[in-house]
Amino acid sequence: MAINYLENSKQIIKKNKIEFVDLKAIDLSGRLHHITLPVYPNVLDKLISEGVGFDGSSYGFRKVENSDMILIPDLSTARIDPFREAPTLSFYSHIVLTDEKRSPFSQDGRYLAKKAEELLKKTTGADKSWWGPEFEYYIFSKVEYDTRTESSYYRIESEEEFYKKGYHAANPFDAYDDFRDEACKLLRAQGVEVKYHHHEVGERGQQEIETYFSDLLTTGDNIVTAKYVLFNYAKQKGLNITFMPKPMFQQAGNGMHLHFYLTKKGKNAFYKKGEYGNINELGRYFIGGMLKHGPALAAFTNPSTNSYKRLVPGFEAPVALTYGQGNRASAVRIPKYISNPDETRFEYRPPDATANPYYCTIAMLLAGIDGVVNKIDPIKEGYGPIDKNFLDPSYTGKIHFLPRNLEEALDALAVDNDFLKRGGIFTDELLDQWVKIKNEEIHSINTMPHPFEFKMYFNL
C-alpha cells in the first residue's frame, strides 16, 4: 500500500501541536536556505498545490526565463526540527518553475538525482545505487577570522592536542565523545542511521561519523541533514565545528569519503568471489569510469579552493587516480575488512563536504555509468590495482593524479563533460553557471593578500 504522506504529515501536525512549517532547500553551492510559514487550516494542501515563491537568482541559480521559482514540500521528508523553539515541521523541497505545468527546475539537485537513478536502471539494469558517507569535521573551542582591506587573519583554539595521531583516541583524551553520542541520537531522530563514530587522525579535535547506506536522493538529503544537525548542536554547546577540507596547517584534512555499490533484483551487483577485492566486471567498469573522469569530477567532488590544500601527499589524503585495497592515497579503495557479499563495495575518497551533495553524487554516478557504457577497464587503463606506495620508483611516469587546484579541475571539466550530459542530467546552463561561480571564488582568493605572504615578502 502506498504511503499517504499528506495524511501522515497532517497527523504529525495535530499530534505534536506543530505551529510552523519550514521548507528547506540548498543553493547552487550547497548552502542551506529555508522559509517558514505559520500553520493554518489546510496549509499543506495549499503548499502542495501552489508552493511558495522565491527568488532563484539569490540561490545562485542561472536565470532561465526569470528568477521567480517555487518551492514545493516533499512530504516524504517530514521531520520535526529539534532546533526550533516553536514546534516546527520541516520538509526538503522540490524546486519548480512558474509555468502552468510547474515544470521541474533543471538545476534542482533533488530532481536530477531522480533522473540519474532512472538513467542507471536504463543503462546498467541495476535497481538502485547505494551510498554510505563518512563525515569528517573538526571541533574547536574558539574560532576568530576576518578579512578586510587592511587586515586578514584567522585564529583557532582547540581543547585537544595530541602528541601523535588522534585516531580512535579514548577518553578522557577524546574530549568530544559525549558530543558525538548526542549528535548521533539527533541524527537518528532525523532519519539518518549512524554506523559508528570516533576520534579521527587530526590531533586538535578531528571527529568522524559514518552513516549507513541510502539511495542517491536520500543520501543527498542526509548529507544536508548531517551538516544542519552538527552545526546547530555545536552552537547549542558553545562550540565551533567545520567541514572545511583543510582548516589547519600540517594537520589532517576533512574528507567526505563515499562508499558505493549497486543492487540488481535486490542483490549486490558488484560481488564476484575470487576477483580482486571480490569486485566483478560491472564494479570495475564503475571504478574505471570514476577514475577516467576523476579530474573533471573534482570540479564537483572538491569544489573549493581549500579542497586542494587537503589533497596533498602525507596526510592519508587521496591524490592518485588509482585503485587498490590497502592504499589510502588512492582515489578508490576497496575495503579489505568486508566479508559479507551483500556489503561488497568500493570507496571513492576524494570528495569533501564543501560539495553540493546532489551534484557530487550524481556526477560520480554518471562517471560510473560512462565506465559501463564504454567498458572502461581500470586495469587496462593503468589505474591499478596498486597496493604499494605510489611514490615507488617503479611507478614513475605511470600514475595520473587529481588536479592540484580548483583551476585545474575546472579546466578538466571544460574538456571532459559529455558524460555529465548523458540523459540530459547536467545541462550546459548548469555547467556554465557552476564554472562561473567557481571562477569568482578563485578570483577572490587570488586577488586577496595572504598573511603568509607578509611573512615571506614584507621585508624583501
Image: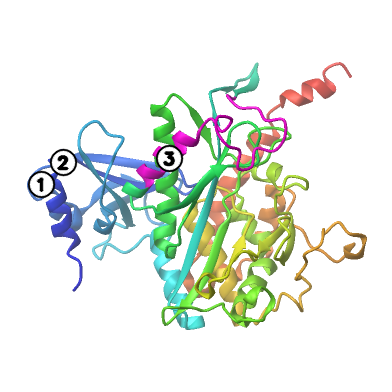
Q: Is residue 162 magenta?
A: yes
Looking at the image, is 274 positioned above or below residue 168?
A: below
Q: Amino acid at mark 3?
A: Asp
CB under 8 Å between discs 1 and 3: no
Which residue is nearer to you in this view: 65 or 35? Answer: 35
Mark 3 residue element: helix
Give the residue displayed 65% in from the left and 65% down from the top: 336
| Residue at image mark 2 | 18
- The image shows a total of numbered marks equal to 3
One can see residue 208 in this view: no
In terms of image quadrants, where is residue 127?
bottom left
| Residue at image mark 1 | 14
Residue 146 coordinates in the image, percent (x, y): 58, 22
In terms of image quadrants, where is residue 294?
bottom right
Q: Is residue 56 left or right of residue 17?
A: right
Which residue is nearer to you in this view: 126 or 162? Answer: 162
Q: CA distance from mark 1 to mark 3?
A: 30 Å
Q: Give residue 181's mark.
A: 3
Q: Quadrant of the C terminus?
A: top right
Q: CA distance from mark 3 to mark 2?
A: 27 Å
Residue at the right extreme? Answer: 393
Mark 1 residue element: helix
The part of the chain drawn in magenta is 158-187
Looking at the image, is 460 positioned above or below residue 203?
A: above
Residue 251 coordinates in the image, percent (x, y): 70, 36
Tell us which disc is closer to us: 1 or 3: 3
